[in-house]
Amino acid sequence: MRRTTIALLAALEASVAALIGLGIVLVPLMLLWAMHFELAVDAGVFLRTSADVWLLGHGVNLVVQLDPVTAGRIPVPGAGDPFPITIALLGFALITVAFGRRIGRRSAAGGHSFSGGVAAVVVFVAVGVGLALLAADEAARADVWQAAWLPAAIVALGVVIGAVGEVLRTSGTTDAATGLVRRALAVVPAGLVAGGRAAVRIGAGAVFGVLGISAVLVAVLIALDYATIAGLYQALGAGVDGGIALTVAELALLPNLVIWAAAWLLGPGFAIGTGTLVSPGGTLLGPVPGIPVLGALPTDAPALGALWLIVPVLFGFVGGWLVGRGEDPDRDVPRAAGWWAPLAVAVAASVVAGVVMGLLAWWSGGAAGPGRLADVGPMPLPVAGVAAATVGIGALVGTYAARFRGRRDEFDERGDVEPRPSALADLVDH
């Protein structure tokens, strides 16, 4: 397929992705405008709100100025002053990553992933800047510089994931960008490449395993506290139209809740306002924002809460074992490294896990309003430190266990059968 055709298709799909994200916000707000306000309010308010929410969902900071009447009804100090909202509704970012992955996969399959990625990034730069400028108002103003690069960076992340996945899945894929990367890696020592791949697999795999357990935990808490959540919906009296808009906002916040649950599982926990803490060691809450799904927050410390730390250790161990014992036919790494190689891989995996988990914790939190709501979400550094330590311990035990098991199998076979190769085995065997 021609380069121009791939770029145009990628630009079209990126435009559709942005429109879908905007539509998810705009449709419930239009229902609210028509049913609740009976078309009596300027529709431009809802259009600007949709743009601001979409930008906020991609991490763009907003500066909000409430009108005196609304500020007087909120019993929070500083409600009448301009305040930032920096917490990202990660559901919108997740949608953009999914579309970016699709664009990257199709562009790589056509042999021009770089062209498709650049086209998608250009579209998101234009959309971000355009929405930030058009939605600018005294009530809410987005950071134009962040609007220019944050949505574009998120779609670029999806493009990279999709392109790399397509190249790894299809051995016959011929892509200029992939060829450039392969030529650059060819000058790097093969053992270092194998160790890096093993570390990324262990560290990132452990983090996503923890996030999977956290998602199950969030689902269980919501199911158990469904009556409380339904009661909060009724207490708000939002009606059908307002309830739909509120539910969309909660769904957009759901990835944040999963990351917060992972921070809780790791031990440091998270805050719902300055001076609050939700962690396995105990819960200290003040007034909670009126979001029904927050009714599922645990109010008491669970029994044996520290045992949750076994989860990242276990995922680190499983990752180290699988990488150490699994087959990797695509690499022929010289058998030159010694006993220190599993240690190096485990340390690198701990760094990967700490960086990924710390970035997710940082991205999922921020300021959600004036006063005490300026501090919401987990603290990135403690979360990153605990993730690195626990995954690193598990990876260290798993990689050495895989090495010793491989050596024992080789001894038992007395050299009659060649041991099966693996990225880590090739790295650590003499």
Image (cartoon, helix red, strand yellow):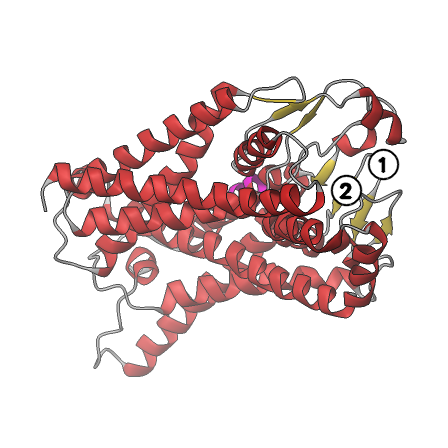
Percent coordinates x, y for residue 415 in the rendering: 23, 77
User: Please, what is the three-letter code of the amino acid marked with disc 1?
Assistant: Gly
Which of the 4 quarters of the picture holds residue 82? top right
Cα–Cα gap, marks 1 and 2: 8 Å
CB of mark 1 within 8 Å of CB of mark 2?
yes
What residue is disc 2 on? 271
What residue is disc 1 on? 275
The reply to whether the magenta stretch includes residue 357 is yes
Secondary structure type for disc 2:
strand
Q: Nearer the viewer, residue 331 or 338?
A: 331
Percent coordinates x, y for residue 101 in the rendering: 34, 49
- Which mark is drawn over residue 37? none
Instruction: Give the residue displayed 81% in from the left and 67% down from the top.
Output: 227
Which of the 4 quarters of the picture holds residue 130? top left
Q: Is residue 299 placed above or below 274 in the rendered structure? A: below
Image position of 188 (left or right of 358): left
Q: Specify start and end residues of the magenta stretch as a single range.
A: 355-359
